[in-house]
Image (cartoon, helix red, strand yellow):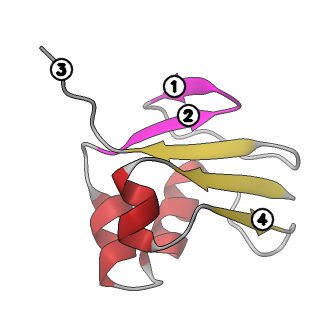
Amino acid sequence: MIKVLFFASFREQLNCEQLSLEEGEYSALLSELKRQLAEKGDAWREVMMSDRTLVAINQNMTRQDVTLRSGDEVAFFPPVTGG
């Protein structure tokens, strides 16, 4: 099982705080998981396909396409701005 978390505006935009996906319910690669979630609708596609979406695997930020393993936590964050 993997846990997928959504933070800040993504939580509201998707009307979803988290998903728990069992083996067989998710793809092995992060890029494939994003494509799979994007199929859930327009709001999901907007979040998952944006180059600006930030991703952390097990609380480590990544821009790489990584292999997901049972027990992983995948978190999606909107872009961070500040001044």
Mark 4 lies on a secondary structure that is: strand
Determine which of the numbered discs, if any, sits on residue 82 in the image.
Answer: 3
Amino acid on which disc 1 is placed: Met
Q: Which residue is most to the top?
A: 83
**Discs 4, 2 touching: Cβ within 8 Å:** no
Q: Distance between the Cα atoms at labels 1 and 4?
A: 20 Å
Q: Is 61 on the left-hand or right-hand side of 27?
A: left
**The image quarter in which residue 20 lies:** bottom right
Badge nearest the viewer, 1 or 3: 3
Question: In this rendering, is residue 7 above or below 13?
Answer: above
**In the rendered structure, which disc, 1 or 3, sits on the residue that comes first in sequence?**
1
Q: Residues within 10 Å of mark 2 (few under 14, many from 20)?
A: some
- Residue that mark 4 sits on: 20
| Span colored in magenta | 53-62
What's the residue at 58%, 62% (across, down)?
Answer: 33
**Mark 3 closeness class: few <14, some 14–19, many ≥20 residues within 10 Å:** few
Give SS at disc 1: strand
Q: Which disc number belongs to residue 56?
A: 2
Residue found at x 71% / y 31% = 58
* Quarter placement of the N terminus: bottom right
Question: Which residue is painted at 46% across and 60% down in the image?
Answer: 11
* Residue carrying label 1: 61
Q: Residues within 10 Å of mark 1 (few under 14, many from 20)?
A: some
User: Which residue is nearer to you in this view: 51 or 44?
Assistant: 44
Instruction: Provide residue 14's location: percent of width, then percent of height.
Output: 43, 71
Cβ–Cβ under 8 Å for marks 2 and 1: yes
Mark 4 or mark 2: whose residue is earlier in sequence: 4
Instruction: Identify the amino acid type marked 3.
Output: Gly
